[in-house]
Amino acid sequence: MATLDENLDKAGRYMARWADGCLNHIAGQSVPAASGRMFETRSPVDLAPLAQVAEGDAADIDRAAQAARDAFPEWRAMPGAKRRDLLHAIADAIVARAEEIALTECLDTGQALRFMSKAALRGADNFRFYADKAPEARDGQSLYGPNQINMTSRTPIGPVGIITPWNTPFMLSTWKIAPALAAGCTVVHKPAELSPLTARLLVEIAEEAGLPPGVWNTVNGFGETAGKALCEHPAIKAIAFIGESRTGQAIMAQGASTLKRVHLELGGKNPVVVFDDADLDRAADAAVFMIYSLNGERCTSSSRLLVQDTIYDAFTARVAEKAANIRVGHPLDPETVIGPLIAPEHRAKVLSYFDTAHAEGATIATGGEAWGDTGCWVKPTLFTGATNDMAIAQEEIFGPVLTAIPFADEADALRMANDVGYGLAGYLWTSDVTRALRFSDAMEAGMIWVNSENLRHLPTPFGGMKSSGIGRDGGDWSFDFYMETRNVAFSTTAHRIPKLGG
Ligand code: NAD
């Protein structure tokens, strides 16, 4: 395993390519913003500028949307098997540049290399999974009725807009874009302004692997300008969005006048419920992993720890001890688990919850302060003695911060698990199978893992309820979003047609 110094050296060489800036990519061309404006992306490690980024706005979105519209007829008509081969070629090209992607992602987001080295490979897996599904994307059913045979089929909806957030931006971009391309849609991608670099690498990799120009266009810029224009553009038929719940509301409103189809993957305040009959060693490891990996900047993080009162003190003491031992450091240090948060504003938001916890009367069992002299670190933190109505139990903090709440019995645990505005994920630890079935059936969450951390299986549905979103990704569910389903009814008999007017 390479040392921090070796990784810094390699990263420095990869970062040299950004000296000319991170431009937009439209119709196969690397282009500056129409306005000529640029903004800076900074490293959360030391706030040093990493690159100047093209600041796209409505004019650039319009160009990109037209390119996507022009490329659509040919891309839609391409046989699925050929699209499959192209998407596999993109996956191969991602793997070939996995080191560059990982090191760039670490510096742009602050995520630790031990997790990001796998994110590039997971991105390639997303392409491979949807590559193999491309030939079947248009398939439908035949449904027999009285006097008729119905044939359903699917057809790609058209050019789509994809808007992604700053947490694990490379992996999330592949997760959205691969199924859109496999379905036969063309794409305009608006990456997060705080972490634009790997999205630019991704479109470049795809075209070098043979993707035709215009099929995938990337426009950098801010949400309120470029993002809004994408939602409003009449050539764009659907918006797939990942981000905050409040932004999701804006996306729906902005898309309303063009009746945009929207898919929203939003925030979470996910419970991990631990009963006293669980395998407590495994439960503690999973709870710690799900909140402190990826800096806690993870939509499915287990940010509310509900523990049966019989084991609450011992279990939270164990979690606190593990949290205190977690290595905080430079994201390129192979030993680092927690790197700096994405930006100073986000760190300030996370730190503000330490004051909130004090004010609400919770106890800071470990952490509860910033780390380091420069950059955006906070220490892994555990709040104990909390109740479910506190802001630290209800609001998405999106950092390495866990709120632990005791419960008395199953009914109490279920009430608290569901008593929150979000409904993305839930985690349940018990050795009682009947209770696991009963409890998971009543939990208000789109995804529930029983006796496990978040282990993704790509054919399964991914998405949330309540304020956590609308729609599902994964498997065939992604095609339902990116495609229109059509039914053609053939008459099989000379059935009686109602006669009007003689
Ligand atoms: P954000 O909502 O601030 O920004 C996400 C994207 O939306 C960015 O590209 C931004 O520029 C754009 N945007 C902002 N305002 C816009 C507007 N008015 N119109 C169009 N686009 C606009 O989210 P973030 O802070 O970048 O990401 C963190 C959030 O994402 C957290 O809430 C997290 O839970 C959520 N998230 C959810 C999932 C999921 O699958 N449910 C996955 C990852 C992250």
Image (cartoon, rainbow, N blue to C red):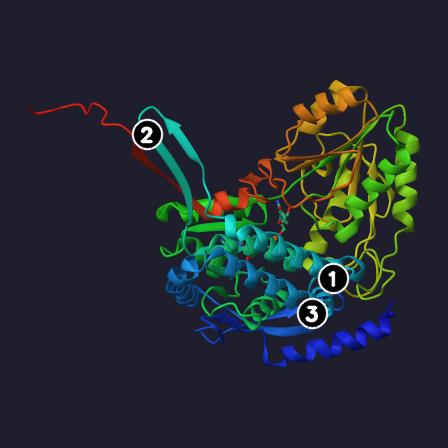
Q: Is residue 94 above or below residue 134?
A: below
Q: Secondary structure at mark 1?
A: loop
Q: Nearer the viewer, mark 2 or mark 3?
A: 2
- How far from the left and from the top, in percent, is residue 291? 78, 45
Q: Quadrant of residue 19?
A: bottom right
Task: Specify which label sits upstream in the sequence, 2 or 3.
Answer: 3
Task: Specify which label sits upstream in the sequence, 1 or 2.
Answer: 1
Residue situated in front as seen by the camera: 38 or 182 = 182
| Residue drawn at the location 72% of the way across and 33% of the way down | 390
Q: Does the rendering let one see residue 368?
A: yes
| Residue drawn at the location 59% of the way across and 44% of the way down | 475
Q: Nearer the viewer, mark 1 or mark 2?
A: 2
Residue extending farthest to the front is: 493
At label 2, the amino acid type is: Gln
Residue for badge 1:
110
Left or right of 359 in this view: 492:
left
- Tell me if mark 3 has few (under 14), some (14-19) or many (20+) residues whose alpha carbon lies within 10 angstroms of its own: some
Q: Nearer the viewer, mark 3 or mark 1?
A: 3
Left or right of 436 in this view: 236:
left
- How far from the left and from the top, in percent, is residue 467? 57, 37
Give the Cα distance between marks 1 and 2. Answer: 59 Å
At label 3, the amino acid type is: Ala
Q: Secondary structure at mark 3?
A: helix
The verdict on label 1 being within 8 Å of ligand 1 is: no
| Residue drawn at the location 60% of the way across and 40% of the way down | 463
- How far from the left and from the top, in percent, is residue 365? 88, 41
Residue for badge 3:
96
Residue extending farthest to the left is: 502
Q: Does the rendering let one see residue 31?
A: no
Kindly identify which numbered label has been placed on residue 148: 2
